[in-house]
Every structure is written in C-alpha cells, then in structure tokens.
C-alpha cells in the first residue's frame, strides 16, 4: 500500500524527558439503546395514532402526535432514521447478500407496512415527520383537478421503481439524495435541496401534502397495504345520509363520492374502453421493457465504477488528456484497469436487467391505472379511498352525524342530496 | 360486502406473506448494531472534499494523529508551508488554514503535533503534506460525536477514491498505526 511504505523518519528517542506517546482518542458512537428507543417510539406512536384515528376519532390528538414526530424524528433525529429511505436498504439487502441491515432499519421499513395492513395509513397521519411537517403547513387547501391528481400520483410509482433499481445495483440512494425535508430538519444542506424543500412546503400551504401524494415512494407501498386494511377511516360514525358536507373536507382528494345521484353512464362505451385498456396493458408492459433496455446504459453511467471505467477508456483511446481526482485515486491505489472493466461490464448487465424490470413495472402501473379509471364502481356512501386516505381525521367533524354524536351544534344542511 | 371482504382479506393475507418473505430473506443477516461511516486512511487521497461535502456546516471529518508513527520532526511537512520563512509558529508559515494543528516543543530536536479538533475543518492539507513527505501519521477520520450517520453519506458519494464505507459500530475507527502499516 502506497502511503505507509514510506516510514521516512525514525521514531524519536526521548532520552531527556522520557515523553510518553499520546494515543488518538475515540469519540463516542451513537449508543445502541438510542437506536432501540427510536424503534420503540415508532411503534408507540403508530399504536397511539391508530387508536386516535380509528377509535377516538380525534383530529387534535393526531395534530399533537404530528408535532411530536416533527420534533423527535425530524429535528432531534435529523430525519435520518426514516421509513421512506429504509426501502433502499431493504432492496439492497435483498439483492446483495453481503449487505447487512440493522434491526432498527428493518423495523422502520416493515412495521409501518404491517400497521397499514390493519389500520390504514396511520403512519402517514402523524408518525412520519415528512408528512406531519407538511400537514402542519396546510393552511389554505385548494382542490387539485382530479385528472392532474391522478397523473401526478403516478410519479411516486416511477420514483419507487427507480429508487429500487439504484439501491439494488449499489448505485446510490436517490431517495436520500433528493430528500426535500431532511435539509430543513438539519438546518443545513446544499442550496438546491434547501430551495426544493422550502418551495415544496410553500406549495404545501395550498396543495395538501405534495410530497406524500405525488412523490413519496414509501407512500406507494403503504397505499398498497392500506387498500387491504382490515379497519379503515369511516367518515360517518353512523349511516351516510348523502348530505355531501364531507365532500370538500378532504384536502388530499381521497374521498370517493357516492354515485347515488350520478346520472347513469352509457354502458357500451364503458365496456369498449375497458376492453381497449385490457389490450393496451401488455402493450404498455412490453413497451416499458423495451424502453428500459435502452435506458439501462444511461442509468449504469451513474454508478461510480462504470463512470470511472468509461473515463479510463476515453483516456486510453486518447480522446481526453487531463485527469480527474477519481482517476488519480484509482492510479494511486495501484488498481488494474482490467478488473475495473470486468466490474463495469457486469454492472452494465445488471443495470440493463434492472431497467427492463423497472420499465415493465412502470408499464404495468400505467396500464392498471387506466383500467382502474375505466372500471365504474357504483358507491352508495361517501367513503375514504383506502389507498389514498392519509388518516388525518380532518373529515370527521364535517359529518353532521359525528357532530351529533359529540353533542356539538349541527349546521343547517343547505341542499340535502335527495331534496 | 361479503365478496369485498373476502377479496380484501385475501389481498391482506398475500401482502402479509410478502412482508414475511422480505423479513425471512433479510433477518438472517440483520445485525443488532447499526453501521457507521468511516474513512479508510490507506485509500484516502486527500482531495479535500471531506471539508466541503458533509451535510453538516462544519464537517464531521477531522484530522487525527497516530503519534506512534510520527517522527516528531522539527520541519514537519504537515505543519509548515513549503519553504517556510522560519521554523516557528507564525501563521504565514502554517499549512493549516485554521491553525488547528498545534506544535509544541518536547526536547531537542523533537516537536509534538496535536490537533485542536474544534478548529479542524477536515481539509486534509496537513494530511497531504505529511503523507507525501513525512511518515503519514496525520490522517482523516469521521468523528462519531459529530457525524449524523446519514443513510447515504454525502462525502462517500463524492469521494473520488471510494475510501468511505459502512463499518460495524463496534469498531468505529480505522486509525493508522505502526502495526497496520504492513
């Protein structure tokens, strides 16, 4: 090894003073019990929020836990033990058998999903510091047009696919790299990321939780789990009277309207559309696989080994003359370019395969989305969309039945639905 | 509602199986302790990015000194600018931009060099001087009382030598030493 061979100067002989050599000090590592404390707080907060949302039906309780989460997981733990990021550790561990995952990361990745399977997205409601921070910022909610809402939500699915590709191939953790709120929790970070975070929060004053709805890759998994949840947010504690008062109460576009008053739709056109989208689904998947194969090379270029190999190749073929720090380091550590090329080739193959899977995933997601839009369900109640409902408990108090239950004054209903 | 409950129940069941599968595949390798980030001083090329790429305003990377490797030189190439006016502690002679490297006389002709850590920014200027012309006893390490242990270390991402890796928290430091030089 280059650096240490040269022990140029002999060790001193302290004949006069008998000076004793000091040793370098080891400053303490974040203690293990603090890791376990994080996991305990996570589980306790999940239990508490699930109880507050589903049994107590208390919005103020959810807000209180949200403030606690922003302070604890956000400003105290600096946003870095985080369920959103943990999916990358889990994917890397699934594809790289030498990569171990600490128990706390395992807990942060899987426990909220398990809770979502039973209680819906109570993690999003107030346990996730990212969600809680945006929830507290939401002051003047405006409705996002439904077509825009549905299209933007697709971004999160694509983001999830790309994050898994990069984590599984060892190409880095893009969710952490482009996390908008961690720089805010840390009160430091690169200018672009701080600006991104601040502008998302500013948008979040009007548009409910833009990160959670349109970008969060963990939210995709939670939504999937929540769509099969055993218990769910029920807007009314009793039977729905179609009073439509809850319609405007959801800031996240997660209330499915009752179709009792909707005019009957022409069935033939619906059926034709359904068949068209059924045919389109395999086409989209095949297209995704094709495009993924093309994009694989570009994605691989982001990996430092592939990047370095390409650079060395350019230099060896005489295209570029100057050197980079990475190249200098590579030379200084006496590595051979042959092994590097072999590694880079293997990585490029991995990336092509991973990008094909990712393309198939994106095609599948878009195809299923179109299908789900084409299927008409005739709901008889106003109810929360299980996958999209963030369990924030805002809608409860809009229901006159709930107000009655709590013994609060019920406002006059202006236009009864069947009136 | 019955059909819907059945569908939701079977979806829930299969998702639980999937979660169990992930758990089963990974738990075998799960460790109680978290990992921490550390610099391998033998791979470090003193590029200076540790001072600028850390998410903290003042980097968590600091210079440390393995005294058992040090020659206690009077003309320390980690301490002095090339061609110093005089071998004294005047600021214009020092390589360290913040005066974090402290020179103290022990006995003729030996001087000891210690690091005033709160001043050190992890720029590796002294490390470069010591490694190129001296014994290489000065080197960089991530200080865990400062490091926030990001899931992806942003210095590791920028490191041109790929010298920063996750290490087990039981052995959080990789100090250079006389024994390690072989």
Image: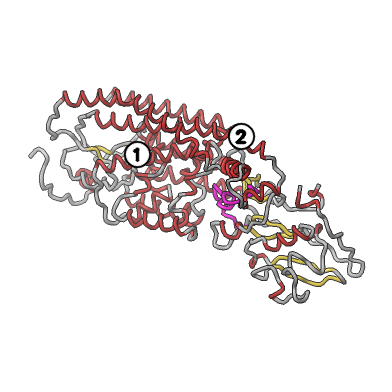
Q: CA distance from mark 2 to mark 1?
A: 34 Å
Image coordinates of residue B150 in percent, x first then y, are: 55, 50
Q: Is residue A320 visible?
A: yes
For the residue labelled by badge 2, is the local secondary structure a helix, a strand or a loop?
loop
In the picture shown, does residue A379 fall above or below B131?
above
Q: Nearer the viewer, residue A208 or B2?
A: A208
In the picture provided, is A399 more to the left or to the right than B155? Answer: left
**What is the quadrant of residue B115 in the picture?**
bottom right
Q: Which chain letter goes with mark 1?
A: A
Q: What residue is pinned by disc 2? A: B29
Give B19 or A263, whichever is nearer the viewer: A263
Which of the two discs, 2 and 1, sits closer to the camera?
Answer: 1
Q: Which mark is residue B2?
A: none
* A167 drawn magenta: no
Residue at the limit of the structure toward the right, as seen here = A15
Question: Could you tell whether A39 is left or right of A54 in the image?
Answer: right
**Mark 1: secondary structure:** helix
Q: Position of residue A123 (x, y in %)?
A: 41, 43
**Left or right: where A340 falls relative to A71:** right
Chain letter of mark 2 equals B
Density class for disc 2 (Cα within 10 Å; few <14, some 14-19, many ≥20) is: some
Residue at 56% across, 45% down: A36
Report x, y in % for residue A206. 28, 54
Q: Quadrant of residue B61?
A: bottom right
Q: Which range is magenta?
A: B145-163
Q: Position of residue A294 (x, y in %)?
A: 45, 33
**Residue drawn at (43%, 43%) of the image:** A46
Lateral position of residue A299 relative to residue A416, left or right: right
Q: How many marks?
A: 2
Residue receiving disc 1 = A154
The secondary structure that most of the magenta stretch takes on is loop
Within 10 Å of disc 1 (Cα), the crowding (few <14, some 14-19, many 20+) is some
């Amino acid at each position: 090894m280059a650096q240490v061979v040269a022990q140029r100067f002999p060790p001193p002989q302290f004949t006069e003073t008998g000076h004793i050599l000091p040793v370098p000090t080891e400053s303490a590592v974040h203690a293990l019990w603090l890791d376990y404390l994080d996991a305990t707080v996570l589980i306790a907060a999940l239990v508490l929020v699930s109880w507050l949302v589903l049994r107590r039906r208390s919005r103020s309780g959810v807000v209180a836990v949200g403030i606690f989460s922003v302070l604890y997981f956000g400003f105290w733990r600096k946003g870095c033990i985080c369920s959103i990021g943990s999916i990358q550790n889990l994917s890397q561990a699934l594809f790289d058998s030498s990569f171990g995952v600490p128990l706390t990361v395992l807990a942060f990745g899987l426990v909220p999903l398990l809770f979502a399977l039973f209680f819906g997205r109570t993690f999003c409601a107030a346990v996730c510091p990212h969600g809680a921070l945006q929830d507290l910022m939401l002051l003047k909610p405006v409705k996002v047009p439904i077509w825009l809402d549905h299209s933007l939500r697709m971004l999160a699915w694509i983001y999830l696919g790309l994050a898994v590709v990069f984590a599984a191939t060892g190409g880095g953790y893009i969710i952490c790299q482009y996390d908008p709120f961690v720089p805010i929790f840390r009160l430091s970070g690169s200018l672009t990321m701080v600006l991104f975070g601040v502008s998302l929060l500013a948008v979040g004053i009007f548009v409910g939780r833009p990160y959670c709805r349109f970008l969060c890759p963990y939210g995709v998994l939670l939504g999937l789990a929540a769509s099969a949840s055993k218990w769910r947010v029920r807007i009314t504690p009793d039977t729905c009277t179609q009073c439509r008062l809850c319609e405007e109460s959801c800031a996240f576009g997660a209330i499915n309207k009752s179709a009792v008053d909707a005019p009957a739709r022409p069935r033939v056109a619906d059926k034709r559309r359904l068949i068209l989208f059924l045919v389109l689904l395999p086409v989209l998947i095949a297209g995704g696989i094709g495009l993924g194969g093309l994009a694989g090379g570009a994605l691989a270029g982001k990996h430092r080994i592939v990047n370095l190999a390409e650079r060395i190749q350019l230099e060896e073929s005489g295209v570029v003359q100057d050197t980079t720090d990475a190249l200098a380091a590579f030379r200084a550590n006496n590595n051979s370019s042959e092994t590097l090329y072999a590694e880079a080739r293997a990585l490029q193959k991995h990336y092509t395969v991973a990008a094909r899977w990712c393309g198939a995933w994106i095609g599948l997601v878009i195809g299923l989305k179109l299908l789900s839009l084409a299927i008409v369900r005739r709901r008889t109640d106003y109810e929360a969309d299980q996958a999209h409902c963030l369990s924030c408990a805002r809608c409860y108090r809009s229901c006159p039945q709930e107000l009655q239950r709590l013994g609060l004054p019920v406002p006059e209903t202006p236009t009864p639905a069947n009136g | 509602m019955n059909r819907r409950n059945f569908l939701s129940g079977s979806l829930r069941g299969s998702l639980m199986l999937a979660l169990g599968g992930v758990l089963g595949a990974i738990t075998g390798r799960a460790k109680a302790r978290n990992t921490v980030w550390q610099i391998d001083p033998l791979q470090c090329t003193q590029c200076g990015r540790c001072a600028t790429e850390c998410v903290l305003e003042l980097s968590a990377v600091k210079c440390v000194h393995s005294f058992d490797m040090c020659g206690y030189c009077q003309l320390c190439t980690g301490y002095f600018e090339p061609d110093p006016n005089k071998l004294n502690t005047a600021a214009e002679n020092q390589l360290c931009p913040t005066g974090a490297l402290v020179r103290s006389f022990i006995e003729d002709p030996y001087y000891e060099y210690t690091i005033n850590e709160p001043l050190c920014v992890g720029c590796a200027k002294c490390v470069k001087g010591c490694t190129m012309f001296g014994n290489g006893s000065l080197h960089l390490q991530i200080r865990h009382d400062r490091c926030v242990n990001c899931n992806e270390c942003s210095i590791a991402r920028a490191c041109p030598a790929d010298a920063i890796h996750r290490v087990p928290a039981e052995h959080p430091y990789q100090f250079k030493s006389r024994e390690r030089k072989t």
